[in-house]
Amino acid sequence: MNDKCNSYRGMIPRALLNDLEEGRSQELEQHLAVCAECRAEREQYLETMEQFSTVEDVPVPRHFFVPADARNATFRELFQAVAWPWKLAAAGAFATLLVLVGLGLSAFQFRSEAGVYAFSFGRPIPELDSSAKTEEAIGALRTELRAFVEQTVQAERKVYLATLRAELDRSGRRLTSEQRRFLEVALSDVEVRMNDRIVTAGGAVETRTLRSLDTMYASLQAQRSQDLTFLRTSIAQTARMSEANDRQTQEVLSTLLEVADLQIQKTMN
Amino acid sequence: MDRLSDASWVEASQRGDTAAFNRLVLKWEKPVYNLVLRMLQDPDDAAETTQEIFLRAFRAIRNFRQDANFSTWLYRIAANHCLTRLRKRGHHRSYSLDDEDSRMAIDRQIPQQESHEHQFLLQDAGERVRQALVLLSPDQRLVLDLKFFQEMTFEEIAAVVQVPLSTVKSRLYDGLAVLKQHFSRRRQRIG
C-alpha cells in the first residue's frame, strides 16, 4: 500500500454513499481495477454496510402518549428545558429573590441621601440630613460662631479698657477734676463705640456668614488702634497742660512766699 | 401526504389538542425509541427518555414553525436529549482500532463476543451491530444512526444535529472506519 492508495481509500466510503464527484469516482474505479488491496478495503466497507441493513427496529415496549394535563410542566422540567443562558438568568433572579426575602425577614433598612448611605438590620436608621435639618444646623452654627466672636471681642475689650484705665490712673494723679472728667467722657465714648462695633460685628456674622473673619478682625483692630492713639495723644496733651499749670502755680507760690518773706522781714525789722 | 398529515396534527397540537399530538406520537414513537435505544444501549433508560422527549416536544410545540419539517424538529429534541443523557452518565471516549490500547478496551466492552464464540455465531446480526455502536463517540453514533437507520440525507442530518455539513461527514466517515475495522477483525478471528 502506498500514499496513492491511502488517498483512494479515503474516497471509498464517500463513493459508496454517493458523496464523491463524478470525475473522482471514475478515477477511483480505475484504481480499484488495478489494486487488489483497495478492492479488499471497499469490500470491507460494503460488508459493514450490509451489517447495518440487518438491523431492524424493535417494537416499542409501550406507547409514549402524553397525558391531557402534560402542558403543565413542573418547575424542574421547565428549568431543564431552557437553554443555559436562560438557566443562568433564572438562577440569578431566584438568588436575588432569596436575598430580598432574607433582607425582608431580617428587617433590613437602607437609606441613601446626598451621597450618604446607611443600612441597619432591625433598628431604625436615624434621620439623615434633610433640607430642614441642614437649615437648622446652619442656624445653630451661625449662633455658635456669633457667640464665639462676641466672647472674643468682649475679652479683648476688657483688656483694652483695663489698659486705658491703668493709663488714666498713672497720669491722673496730677490732673484736675475737670481734666479727669474730660478723660472719663472720652473713655466712655470709646467704650460705647466699642459696644456698637461689637453689635455691628455680630450682625455682620449673622447676615453675611461668607465674610472673612480675618477681615472683620482687621477692621476692629484698626479702629481700636486709632482710638488708642487718640487717647494717648489726649493724655499726653493733658499731662503737658498739667505740668505747665503746676509750674505757673509754683512760680506764683514762690513769688508769694518771697513777698511774704520780705513782709515778715520788714515786720521783724 | 405524511408531511401534510403531520402539519394538520401539529396545528391541532399547537391549539392544545392532546389527541392530535398523540397521533404524532403513535406515528413517530417507534423510530424515536429505536434511535434512543441505539444511543443509550439500555431499554429501560430508552423508554424513560423517549417519554421525556415526547413530553418536551408537546410542551414546546407552540414554538414550532410550520415551515420546518416536524420530524427534523422532533429528532433534534431527541438527539439533544440523548446527548445530554450520555454526558450526565459520565465519561465516554471514542476508539481507534489502530492502537493496541483501544483494541483491548473494545474487547473489554464486548466480552461475550470474545468468550463465547458459538453465541456470537448465533447472535442476531442486528444485535451485533447495536453492540458495536458503543465503540463510537455519541456524536459519531448519532450521525451514523441518522444516516443508516433513519435514512436521512447529509443536509437533514446537519439540520437535526445543528452542525456544518463538513462536520457531519467527518463524524460519519470516522465512525464508519471504526466499525469497518471492527467487523473485519471479527471475520478474521472467526476464520
Image: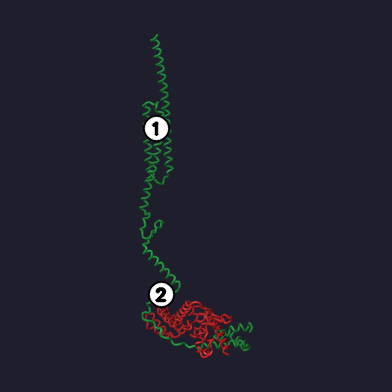
Residues at marks 1 and 2 on the same chain = yes
Amino acid carrying label 1: it is: Arg
Disc 1 on helix, strand or loop? helix
Name, please, the residue furthest toward the front.
B115
User: Residue B8, can we see it?
Assistant: no
Tell me which chain the residue with mark 2 is part of: A
Within 10 Å of disc 2 (Cα), the crowding (few <14, some 14-19, many 20+) is few
Q: Colour of chain B?
A: red
User: Color used for chain A?
Assistant: green
Residue A165's label in the rendered image is: 1
Q: Is residue A149 above or below residue A108?
A: above
Q: How is the image coloured?
A: by chain
Mark carried by residue A76: 2
Q: Check the residue under mark 1 and report the chain it is in.
A: A
In this rendered view, identify the residue nearer to me: B49 or B110.
B110
Task: Inspect the image, locate mark 2, and give the three-letter code of the amino acid beneath it.
Answer: Arg
Pair 1/2: label in front: 2
Quadrant of residue A37 within the rendered picture? bottom right
Q: Residue at x 64, y 83 (%)?
A: A2
A91 relative to A69, above or below: above
Residue appearing at x 55%, y 88% in the figure: A47
Estimate the x, y position of residue A160 in percent, counting from the top left. Answer: 41, 36
Task: Tell me the quarter of the picture where residue A66 sits.
Answer: bottom left
Q: How much space separates mark 1 and mark 2, taking CA atoms?
A: 98 Å
Provide the secondary structure element on which disc 2 rests. helix
Residue B169 image offset from top left, x and y in percent: 54, 81
Disc number placed over residue A209 in the picture, else none? none
- Residue B66 in the image: state x and y as whole percent: 43, 80
Q: Position of residue A187 (x, y in %)?
A: 38, 33
